[in-house]
Amino acid sequence: MAKKVKSRSAAQAAVKKRSGAKAAARSSARKAVKAKARTAAPKKPARPKQRIAVSHHREEDFKADGLRAYAKYRDLGIAEATHGLAQAHVIRLQGPCNPAEVSKLHYHDVEFQMVYVLKGWVKTYMEGQGETLMKQGSAWTQPPKIRHMILDYSDDVELLEVILPAEFKTVELKA
């Protein structure tokens, strides 16, 4: 009987040894996978610290140096304060509206774009949405690369536009 106990005990020890070896192998494999995952995923570069941007209304800050020749832009200092993360400006479309100049189908290669009508009205066309009349207090977002154009606007229209990132490409399309 002592022999059986001895062999049972030896068998159990052998099983434990094998189980321990398997567990150690699994543990080593997990560690290798975790280590590989840690090194495989590149870390996002740290963004520079943002700063406060304050912008007060001054007529002389409206400049004809933006994307469209028929508009004046008042930069709100967001691009500089966010190191290019976002851009915000007030846009005054110069009246009267000339559809031959403004109604050009285009899209912007952006991550986010939002427009809020501060004053007046603007009629837009957006792919999948059709024509929409936006009045003072109206707001809309434009998904990335959505085809759109301005169709008409009031002589006094002012828009607040927020875009991410601050630098982006605009592509004009043939209608």
Image (cartoon, rainbow, N blue to C red):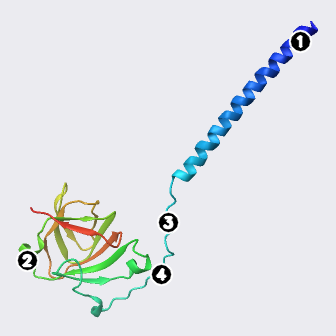
SS for dot 4:
loop
First along the sequence among labels 3 and 4: 3
Q: Please, what is the three-letter code of the amino acid marked with disc 3? A: Pro
Give x and y (percent) for residue 153. Answer: 14, 75
Cα separation, mark 2 vs mark 4, equals 38 Å
N-term mark: 4 or 1: 1
Please tell me which of labels 3 and 1 falls first in the chain: 1
Residues tagged 3 and 1 counted as in contact (Cβ below 8 A): no
Image quadrant where residue 57 sits:
bottom left
First along the sequence among labels 2 and 3: 3
Height in image: 8 above or below 36? above
SS under mark 3: loop
Question: Which residue type carries mark 4?
Answer: Ile
Q: Residue furthest left?
A: 100
Viewer-proximal residue among 172 and 74? 172
Image mark for residue 52? 4
Dot in front, 2 or 1: 1
Q: Amino acid at mark 2?
A: Asn
What is the x, y in percent for residue 68? 19, 78
Between 95 and 35, the residue placed more toward the observer is 35
User: Looking at the image, is mark 2 or mark 4 earlier in the sequence?
Assistant: 4
Give residue 116's position: percent from left, percent from top.
29, 72
- In the picture, the quarter occupied by the C terminus is bottom left
Residue, x 76% and y 21% (percent of image)? 15
Q: What residue is disc 1 on?
A: 5
User: For the view shown, which residue lies furthest in the top direction?
Assistant: 1
Mark 2–mark 3 Cα distance, whole angstroms, equals 45 Å
Instruction: Determine which residue is flagged by label 3.
Output: 45
Q: Secondary structure at mark 1?
A: helix
- Answer with the quarter of the image where residue 1 lies: top right
Where is residue 42? Give x, y as percent. Answer: 50, 57
